[in-house]
Amino acid sequence: MRILTVGLGGAGCKIVDQLYAHDIRNQSRCIDGMAVDSDAERLNSLQVVPPDKRIFFQPLDLSHHGDLASYLPSEEILARLQSLDDGDIDALFLSMGLGGTLAGTAPHLAEYLKKSVSEPIFGLCTLPCRREGDERARTAADQLDQLLAALDGVILFDNESWQGKKSLMQCDDSPVRPVDLASLIGRKSAPPPPLTATERFYTGMNDLIARRITLLFRAGEYSDRYLSNQPQVVLDAGEIINTMEGMGLITIGYARDEIAEEGSLDILAKIRPGAPAVDDQHMKASRVVNLARRAVYDEMSTPVELEKAKKALILIAGHPLEMSMKGFMTVRKWIDRTIQGLELRSGDYPVKGSRFLGVFIILAGMDTLSRVEELRNIRERVKSEDAGKPEDVSAGDPGDATIIL
């Protein structure tokens, strides 16, 4: 699956930077795009997005932050996207942190792009933590409602739900730390400064988002080049798009286990006659089922009730000898019987030599999510509190008047 992505603002640009890094590291070439920001320092801090794919813009009137969308260089963004589109692009993704200033420009940009772009446009968005305050939550709720009306679907990652989770501190080979992303593309860079706890969390969160999204894209990039890694059930880009397109709210879950040396269970089965081989197959099936449960109940990008999903997609990925079709079909049956809708797609993505076995699940089409309702409730409370406040206008100098927005 090949996509173009546009990062908007600080959070969105960092997500795109990580997407680029994982794409380069995996040599999948599934991702291209750009970073857009009105903060030159943040754009310059990106480590992997090429300089010619960074777009800086600055409003002429800095006092009118609410009109930022009118200053967004939509024509330039469209022109660059068209130059990157070789006719093999499956979708566009707009990446952003909801509650941020530039996220408010995304609906305007999406409407502009849809006039010229035929591919579906999705949002890849993070929800703010509670500690970021009610005003940010209120802004995020407004932005999300506007995006749901403008986009073909919005994948949500809830920062609040992931705080303190152990799985956030895992990556493909080692615990999350300040990664020298520049080294991936052959640049020399000075050692990064130590991260604060908050910076460490957001670095881990961006890495987690990029790992999940790039895994999905690689699975949908079917190729005859890897004859030893052919799936039994092919999951192509069209099936991924059909699961998400027009479905509004989308969440993705992914749970994995590290496996022992290559094909360890199968090696043991060969040297142990009789019943142990049956036990090994049962262990493989149970592991797949347990991973699926973890993906749904503990590792969802935003917490969701399985029964409320209208569509689902299941992907099992990892070493081919560690996969279990029995476990895979058990998970299929469970998801199919539980979701509200009738559409379920599935596939496997064998990766010979992988040290992990994972289950990836997409749930789409929920009418709402608990965290989304929480943000909307905060918005209504803040609005009612603001409506009850009297205007604080000083009787003295008019320049001291406070305008209640």
Image (spheres, rainbow, N blue to C red):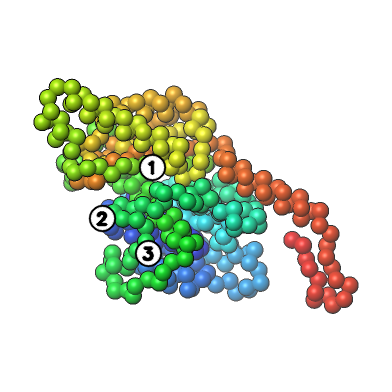
Kindly report which numbered mark, 2 or 1, lies closer to the viewer in this rendering. 1
Name which of mark 2 and mark 3 comes first in the sequence. 2
* Residue ID at (18%, 38%): 264
Q: Is residue 178 left or right of residue 387?
A: left
Kindly indicate the quadrant of the structure image that contains residue 288: top left
Residue identifier under label 3? 178
Which badge, 3 or 1, is on the more N-terminal residue? 3
Please report whichever mark, 2 or 1, sits nearer to the chain's N-terminal start.
Answer: 2
Up/down of 173 relative to 350, above or below? below
The residue singled out by tag 1 in the image is 254
Q: Amino acid at mark 2?
A: Gln
Q: Who is closer to the viewer here, 22 or 175?
A: 175
Q: Is residue 226 left or right of residue 250?
A: left
Label drawn at residue 27: 2
Query: Within 10 angstroms of label 3, few (less than 14), some, or many (20 or more) residues?
Result: some
* Residue at x-position 43% and y-position 42%: 299
3 and 1 marks in contact (CB < 8 Å) = no
Residue furthest toward the right?
395
**Number of numbered discs visible in the structure rendering:** 3
How far across and down, in percent of the image, does residue 24 sit? 29, 59
- How far apart marks 2 and 1 lie (CA) works out to 21 Å
- Residue 116 visible: no
Q: Quadrant of residue 404?
A: bottom right
Residue 131: tell me if it is visible: yes
Q: Nearer the viewer, residue 288 or 70?
A: 288
Q: Residue at x 44, y 55 (%)?
A: 205
* Residue at x 41% of width, y 37% of height: 294
- Element at badge 3? loop
